[in-house]
Image: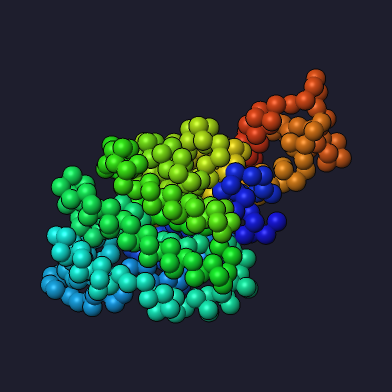
């Protein structure tokens, strides 16, 4: 099975030879984290993707999906600790010089309907050829890369982009005060993106459309499900129809925070994959997997556990074992790796996770779940064959549970051997 096939089938919750071991957000460090790891590892040019042998994940087709022309970025104010600047989308942001935090947004380009009318007229015209200047080279490159193709990326989504244009408080008020303005922002961006996507699919087979929202906190969604249905889902329906028309199998959403209400609403409108399932917000990917057996799941391991001790890390590895056995999961943490995570702890978790993926692949290869066979924590019978089934046909769900037990058994035995017991 190719890497591309494995990723697609995994997110469609179909059987694969093993889970993906992919280079994506779920294993990516903050810049400050990378600098810490370089010092602790003694590797000056540390590249975590190549160090652990991560495989390619989705490759995004290059497209200018926002303002064209963009704003000219410029520094407005500098202090010893912060830099305040205008970015290319027209937002004024304050960043720490050391890159150790999320940006603070101080001002937004859309404050009135007149601002939006000018922004749309001046910067959001389709101009498809100008927005896809790198597409030809991308198509050439992808012919040599074993990876699926994606449309859409951060920071483009229905709610996510509208909020970035106006600010969180302002967009929430505008849903009530100027609802047509909100609809027009979402509709205009969707028009633009679909115009670009229509051109891209003429040149390359696309496997995935991604929508970035980041529309929840620990308390859940920033807007009601009724508002989501009224304002956002008509645009999701257009995306889903485009995907169906062009045989694009995956439509995914990225939202931080608690997403238990968002998932079922968006699934009704064509979404079939989700990320990153922040644990500290209350998400449990095992529960989502059992509740939504056809939802492709990315991430969901608690990144904060890697800043703690072995017991917390093993809790997340236990969670990983369950997800690997249940399937339909792209392994990963629940967001970027923060700088309080040591190189030793990250290395420990990633190496154990990789071994678990390969062990479960081996169990599938010997046919643990084939008719007439089953596996116990001592997986191979005489001559290396799976033990024959006793007393009837085993329960497939129980077999998947046994796979998780087997992976845990080998991990615990390795720990004991290394400890000298």
Left or right of 419: which side holds 301?
left
Q: Residue furthest top?
A: 391
Task: Name the image quarter holding the C terminus.
Answer: top right
Left or right of 315: which side holds 396?
right
Above/below status of 421 relative to 93:
above
Whether residue 168 is visible to the viewer of this picture, yes or no, is: no
Left or right of 215: which side holds 173?
left
**Quadrant of the image occupied by residue 65:** bottom left
Is 74 or 317 nearer to us in this picture? 74
Rendered location of residue 341, percent (x, y): 38, 53
Rendered location of residue 196, percent (x, y): 44, 68
Residue found at x 26% / y 67%: 120
Task: Name the image quarter holding the N terminus.
Answer: bottom right
Rendered location of residue 329, percent (x, y): 55, 45
Residue found at x 52% / y 42%: 295
Q: Residue furthest front?
A: 180
Above/below status of 283 relative to 114:
above
Whether residue 289 is visible to the viewer of this picture, yes or no, is: yes
Is 304 or 73 nearer to us in this picture? 73
């Amino acid at each position: 099975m190719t890497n591309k096939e494995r990723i697609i089938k995994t997110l469609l919750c179909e059987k694969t030879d093993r889970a993906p071991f992919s280079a994506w957000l779920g294993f990516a460090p903050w810049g400050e984290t990378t600098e810490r790891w370089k010092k602790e590892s003694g590797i000056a040019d540390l590249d975590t993707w190549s160090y652990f042998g991560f495989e390619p994940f989705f490759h995004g087709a290059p497209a200018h999906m926002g303002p064209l022309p963009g704003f000219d970025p410029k520094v407005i104010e500098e202090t010893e600790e912060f830099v305040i600047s205008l970015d290319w989308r027209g937002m004024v942001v304050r960043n720490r010089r050391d890159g150790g935090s999320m940006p603070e947004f101080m001002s937004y380009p859309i404050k009135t309907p007149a601002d939006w009318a000018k922004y749309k007229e001046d910067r959001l015209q389709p101009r498809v050829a100008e927005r896809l200047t790198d597409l030809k080279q991308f198509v050439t490159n992808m012919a040599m890369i074993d990876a699926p193709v994606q449309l859409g990326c951060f920071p483009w989504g229905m709610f996510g982009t509208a909020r970035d244009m106006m600010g969180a408080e302002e967009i929430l008020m505008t849903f009530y005060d100027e609802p047509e303005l909100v609809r027009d922002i979402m509709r205009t961006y969707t028009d633009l993106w679909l115009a670009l996507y229509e051109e891209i699919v003429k040149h390359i087979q696309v496997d995935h459309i991604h929508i970035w929202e980041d529309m929840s906190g620990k308390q859940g969604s920033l807007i009601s499900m009724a508002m989501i249905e009224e304002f956002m889902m008509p645009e999701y329906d257009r995306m889903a129809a485009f995907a169906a028309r062009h045989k694009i199998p995956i439509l995914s959403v990225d939202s931080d925070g608690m997403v238990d209400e968002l998932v079922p609403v968006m699934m009704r409108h064509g979404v079939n994959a989700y990320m990153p399932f922040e644990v500290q917000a209350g998400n449990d990917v095992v529960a989502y997997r059992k509740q939504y057996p056809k939802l492709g799941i990315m991430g969901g391991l608690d990144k904060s556990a890697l800043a703690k001790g072995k017991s917390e890390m093993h809790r997340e590895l236990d969670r990983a074992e369950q997800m690997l056995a249940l399937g339909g999961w792209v392994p990963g943490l629940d967001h970027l790796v923060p700088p309080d995570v040591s190189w030793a702890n990250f290395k420990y978790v990633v190496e154990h996770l990789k071994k678990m993926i390969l062990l479960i692949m081996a169990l599938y290869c010997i046919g643990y779940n084939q008719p007439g066979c089953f596996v116990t924590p001592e997986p191979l019978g005489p001559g290396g064959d799976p033990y024959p089934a006793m007393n009837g046909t085993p329960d497939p769900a129980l077999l998947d549970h046994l796979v998780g037990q087997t992976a845990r058994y080998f991990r615990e035995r390795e720990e004991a051997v290394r400890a000298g017991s």
